[in-house]
Image (cartoon, helix red, strand yellow):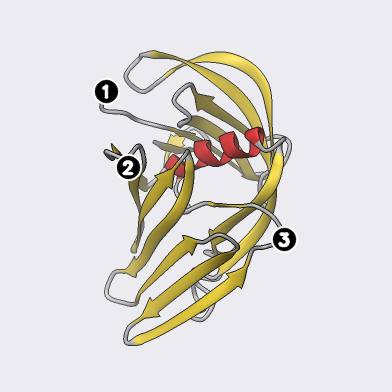
Amino acid sequence: MYRLNGELAPVEEFWCRERLGDGSARVSSGRRAGVVAIDTEALEIGGRIQSFAARWREAGARECAVDYALHQQSLRVVSREGAEQREREIDCAAGPVLLFPLMRIYVGGVIEALLAAGGSGCVILPELGVAGDSMRLFEPRFSERRAEVVASEVLRDASGKSRHCRRCCYLGDQYEEDASFWVGDDHLLERYQWRQDAERLWDVTLSRDD
């Protein structure tokens, strides 16, 4: 549930997490905002995203898709728009990196991985800030991020159930010191608050079926 300055925002985001027989998980999520729809599906192994696919659609307009896959020392990116397809291998030998497939359901795992790595690391995510530029939409962006546990707290979720969480700061790019992220015992992001600018405060909470 997205709230902007305390009011419900016209953003819908849904998710599904499926445990597989080998201990990995398939996680999917989609977002609807205005005429834009974004859908993702990711493979999670050992708590980290190993690969994912993302698709961007605009009503009555363009459709773009991309596949990201981490290998031992490289990142493979395959992007498609219409009949055009591009493939690239990006060297990641300088150090471990974390994939972030854009949606909020993946944030908790990224924060957990950063904490396990000592609090900082490189996060790779598809670029969205240039959606009007076909050549740059979904381009990989390398972002240095930091995470730190601030406090242990209990939150009530949308169903009224109490959940134990760690309130964390998660810093990098648009997220500054005043942003707060609550990660549950199951490593899912229960809530986050982020001030986009002086006039826009976002408060986003996770809804569950259980």
Relative to 26, is 64 above or below?
below
* Disc nearer the start of the sequence (3/2): 2
Residue 36: percent from the left, percent from the top? 36, 63
CA–CA distance in space, label 1 to label 3: 41 Å
Q: Residues within 10 Å of mark 2 (few under 14, many from 20)?
A: some
The amino acid on which the numbered mark 1 sits, given as a three-letter code, is Asp
CA–CA distance in space, label 2 to label 1: 13 Å
Q: Which mark is on residue 210?
A: 1
Task: Depth check: give the residue in front, 139 or 26.
Answer: 26
74 with respect to 148 (left or right): left
Mark 3 lies on residue = 94
Query: Which residue appears at 37% of the width and 80% of the height?
Result: 81
The amino acid on which the numbered mark 2 sits, given as a three-letter code, is Trp
**View extreme (bottom): residue:** 83
Quarter of the image with the C terminus is top left
CA–CA distance in space, label 3 to label 2: 33 Å
Task: Depth check: give the residue in front, 208 or 12.
Answer: 208
Residue 44: percent from the left, percent from the top? 41, 45
* Disc nearer the start of the sequence (1/3): 3
Q: Mark 3 or mark 2: which is in front?
A: 3
* Disc nearer the start of the sequence (2/1): 2
Query: Which residue appears at 72% of the width and 60% of the height?
Result: 94
Query: Which residue appears at 50% of the width and 72% of the height?
Result: 137
Residue 7: percent from the left, percent from the top? 44, 35
93 with respect to 53 (left or right): right
